[in-house]
Amino acid sequence: MSRNTGNIKVIEHLQDALAEFLDDHRTFAREDPEWLEGFNEMTQPERDQMPGCGCKCCESAGYLRGNI
């Protein structure tokens, strides 16, 4: 059941927070040589589809970002 409360500002803030979370995780992951090695082996479309650093938290945040 979906309920529309019309609270667009809250949704905008949640979307912004999720985007910042994903950016922060990706930035931190770039300091990890193992992660960077795997990232460099990916194709560009794979990189573009991976939310944040690709961990379970980033996957959840990426899903929520598009579905709130």
Image: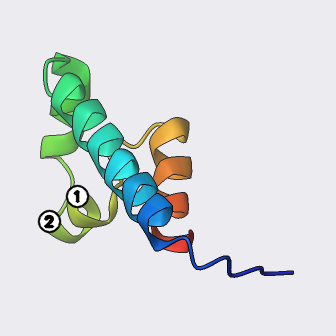
Asked whether 1 or 4 is in front, the reply is 4
Q: Secondary structure at mark 2?
A: helix
Residue at 77% in and 79% down? 3
| CB-based contact (under 8 Å), mark 1 and mark 2 | yes
Q: Secondary structure at mark 1?
A: helix
Q: 59 or 39, which lies in front?
A: 59
Residue 6, above or below 14 = below
The amino acid pointed to by label 2 is: Gln
Say which residue appears at 45% left-offset and 43% top-offset.
58
- Please rate how many residues cluster around mark 2, counting C-alpha atoms within 10 Å: few if below 14, some from 14 to 19, many from 20: few
What is the C-alpha distance between the residues marked 1 and 2? 5 Å
Q: Mark 1: few, some, or many residues within 10 Å (few <14, many ≥20)?
A: some
Q: Is residue 53 something one can see in this rendering?
A: no
Q: Nearer the viewer, residue 42 or 21?
A: 21
Q: Circle 1 is placed at which residue position?
A: 47
Residue 20: x and y in percent read 27, 43
What residue does disc 2 label?
44
In the rendered image, which quarter contains the N terminus? bottom right
- In terms of image quadrants, where is residue 5? bottom right
Residue at 46%, 37% (x, y): give it.
Answer: 55
* Image coordinates for residue 40, horizontal then vertical, percent: 12, 43
Residue at position x 56%, y 68% in the image: 68
